Image: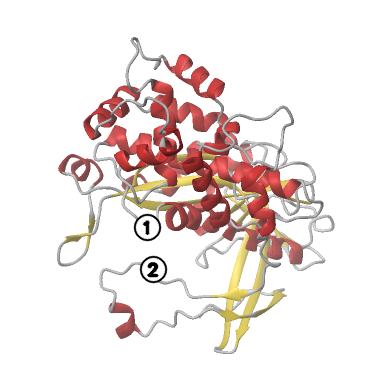
Amino acid sequence: MGELTQIVPFEMVDAVLAECGAVQQRLRKLPARVVVYQLLAAVLFAECGYVAVWSKLTGALRSLPLPQITATGLWQARTRLGVRPLQALFDLLRGPATAIRTTGARWAGLLVVAIDGTHLDVPDDPAVRARLGKGTNQYATSGYPQILLVALVACGTRAVIDATFGPRTSGETTHGRRLTRSLHTGMIALLDRGFASNTFLRAVADTGAVFLARLSAARKPPVLHRFGDGSFLSRLGDMEVRIVECEITIATTAGRHTGVYRLATTLLDARRYPAFELVRLYHERWEVESAYFAIKKSMLGRRVLRARTLPGIAQEVYALLTVYQVIRIAIADATDSVCGADPDRASFSVALHAARDQVIQAAGVIAGTTIDLVGGIGRAVLDHLMPTRRLRVSPRAVKRPLSRYAYKSLRVDRRTYKATISIDILLTRPISP
């Protein structure tokens, strides 16, 4: 895995294999440790088949007597390995990847995290389709079967703290309940309307974490007491919360758009946590969308997963999450080495391509006597830091329509605009449109 091997060293992989009882019983062409690294490398080269990935993984080792590997042999090795070693490896590596000094990771002393879900396409194999189903419309079924991935992401670094996945029919909140195991005191969880049910909010509050969630327009929480900053004390079920109602206007050269937001939080101290700052903080929820973009676009290139069995799909998803997390750790190590460097300015694509080059060259596999926390990947990131993020908006539209001509008839404006935002805290109930 090139330099990434220093984050996922041989000893870590061997310990995981031993813990899961997945160490090979006899010496094979493909020992279990090699199969783990093969699966991780396959994530870096999503456009290649497994045999081509093997060629890249061993490309710099041609002077050594390497065994001849076939596609069937690789398939059998992956099947023998199973899912548990990749899941255990991800469990070891998942986390916020933040240091105390990491810029933008915390707000008012709280680690800012977000929960959201996305869908991954999987092969349209009969067994997979029978288990996961397919999307339907009024005419017929369409598209690929999909799995629902729900993740708890640290907004400051976009690292994955925890993740779960399964059939999309179970729904985001069902999968999201499993992620409450990783919430704790000292966190503030940003949630969209899909996670704002009383039951889910209570589950989050019971972990000791606080939340900032957007409520749907249909909910009308009672006003129990009005605070000086315009927010008011209210109640959701048996839970005491503070409500902030605001009007946000986005102005671009294409026009103006105004929307009303209603946010609920368990932070009841209006002086310590002003309403205006809470509204600004809620925008950080979109960092989880940036994490999904890196996984689905930068890493997968919007491709369908390779595996054609449910255990194989689970194995591949854990490998995908593991490699994503390892790259985020490398980025965090690099930005932490520069005082005041915000991880938002680090390019995931630059880090990904640098990691691929390291694999092909078999470079940086073994750490030197002097530990370099930045390394080749980190230096590539620091050499290409992006400018401070500009305020821009673009429409939420289907990025991969069934027809590439469909968006023309819908007249969807896909351009990105520079924007200005104004926030007004509402002191009275907005009039429903």
Q: Is residue 24 above or below residue 99?
A: above
* Circle number at residue 302: 1
Of residues 55 and 19, which is closer to you in this image? 55
Label 2 sits on a secondary structure element that is loop
Kind of element beneath mark 1: loop
Give left or right: position of 280 versus 133.
Answer: right
Q: Which residue is labeled 2 in the image?
A: 399
Q: Nearer the viewer, residue 152 or 343?
A: 343
Residue 412 location, x and y as percent?
40, 81
Q: Position of residue 50 (x, y in %)?
A: 31, 39
Q: How was the colour assigned to the protein in this rendering?
A: secondary structure
Which residue lies at the image location 52% right of the left edge and 58% below the top edge?
289
Q: Is residue 431 left or right of residue 411?
A: right
The image shows residue 432 at horizontal and vertical percentages of 53, 77
Q: Are marks 2 and 1 in contact (CB under 8 Å)?
A: yes
**Could you say where residue 296 lies in the image, as x and y percent from the top left?**
43, 54
Numbered disc in front, either 2 or 1: 1
Identify which residue is drawn at 34% across, 54% down. 303
User: As rendered, which of 210 and 353 lies closer to the eye?
Assistant: 353
Query: Does any portion of residue 318 appear in the rendered image?
Result: no
Can residue 245 be seen in the rendering of this structure? Answer: yes
Q: What residue sits 64% from the left and 30% below the top?
A: 367
Quarter of the figure with residue 286: bottom right
